Image: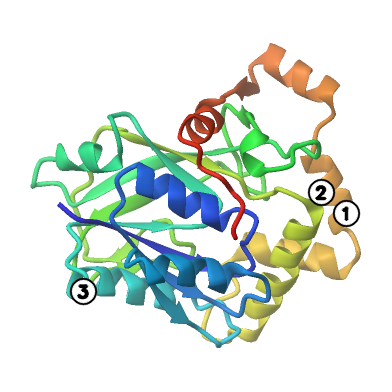
């Protein structure tokens, strides 16, 4: 069985190397990565894995964040060109955690009648003292997006040559009436805010790209658009401060049950010596 992961990246050098190494350890066989105008070392990281026969790099120069189009292209390539049995459409700040031995083992047990597996996502609290993202070990019990809405699940799917992925990269728009496995066999550890510089860069560039895309309705990317408006008004630092927590606030959240301590990813990365440094 072959598991292929797709990634759409832009300036993700602080987390991309570890993401790929982690998912390789977890049984992912191959990566299709679209780099969209990165100005950091992200392309070099991808090229390293490409030179090892572990990745296929697509360079996308259109600055409109046409995520659904680009991820759909990768998902279809995964089946047509790379003969994927399962496809995971991932983001660089997301780490899939299986309930079984590893990702491949978990997917191998899915009965053939099911084509999609849904996974719940957990947002981790930014830790300004952390030197790497994996040192963040406190997360929300019930995660919400930047608008205060429940964080939507994501899905992985069997290799399908005509599959279509939604904008947002959370679900499929084709094929219709697809059968979803009823059990939760994955969790996704999500690190959307790691440093202010990383967060501002993401919002400023992504928000501007959404504004340039006249093919998408304004309802698409609404979270990003609202944060971009905050950035334009000079309010993003205040938002960032609200998202970070003091030690006292974290302690209170742990006591009330709003937050939980979850060191599984950190412990796995340390025990498997998955370094985040790219050389």
Q: Answer left or right for 44 relative to 153.
A: right
The residue at 31%/51% (across/down) is 28
Kindly tell me whether residue 118 is visible in this rendering.
yes
The residue labelled by disc 2 is: 240
Q: Where is residue 143 in the image (x, y as percent from the top left)?
A: 58, 36
Could you give the CA–CA distance between mark 3 and mark 2, rounded to whole angstroms?
40 Å
Q: Where is residue 263 in the image (x, y as percent from the top left)?
A: 56, 25
Report which quarter residue 5 is drawn in. Answer: bottom left
Q: Which residue lies furthest to the top in this view?
A: 255
- Marks 1,2: beta carbons within 8 A: yes
Q: What element carries label 3?
A: loop
Q: Answer left or right for 23 relative to 9.
A: left
The residue labelled by disc 3 is: 162
The residue at 21%/70% (across/down) is 82
The residue labelled by disc 1 is: 237
Q: Position of residue 203 (x, y in %)?
A: 72, 65
């Amino acid at each position: 069985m072959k598991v292929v992961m797709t990634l759409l990246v832009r300036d993700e050098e602080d987390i991309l190397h570890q993401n790929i190494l982690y998912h390789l350890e977890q049984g992912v066989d191959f990566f299709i990565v679209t780099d969209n105008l990165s100005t950091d070392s992200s392309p070099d990281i991808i090229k390293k894995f490409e030179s090892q026969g572990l990745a296929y790099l697509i360079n996308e120069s259109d600055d409109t964040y046409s995520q659904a189009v680009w991820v759909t292209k990768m998902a279809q390539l995964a089946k047509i060109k790379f003969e994927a049995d399962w496809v995971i459409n991932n983001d660089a700040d997301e780490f899939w955690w299986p309930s079984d031995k590893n990702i491949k083992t978990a997917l191998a047990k899915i009965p053939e009648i099911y084509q999609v597996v849904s996974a719940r996502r957990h947002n981790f609290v930014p830790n300004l003292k952390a030197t790497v993202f994996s040192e963040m070990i406190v997360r929300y019990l019930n995660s919400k997006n930047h608008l205060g809405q429940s964080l939507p699940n994501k899905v992985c799917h069997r290799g399908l040559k005509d599959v279509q992925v939604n904008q947002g990269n959370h679900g499929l728009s084709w094929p219709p009436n697809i059968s979803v496995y009823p059990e939760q066999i994955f969790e996704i550890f999500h690190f959307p805010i790691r440093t202010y510089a990383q967060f501002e860069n993401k919002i400023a560039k992504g928000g501007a790209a959404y504004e340039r895309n006249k093919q998408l309705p304004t309802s698409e990317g609404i979270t990003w658009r609202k944060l971009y408006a905050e950035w334009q008004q000079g309010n993003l630092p205040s938002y960032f401060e609200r998202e970070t927590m003091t030690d006292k606030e974290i302690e209170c959240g742990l006591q009330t049950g709003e937050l939980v301590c979850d060191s599984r990813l950190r412990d796995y990365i340390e025990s498997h010596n998955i370094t985040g440094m790219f050389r």
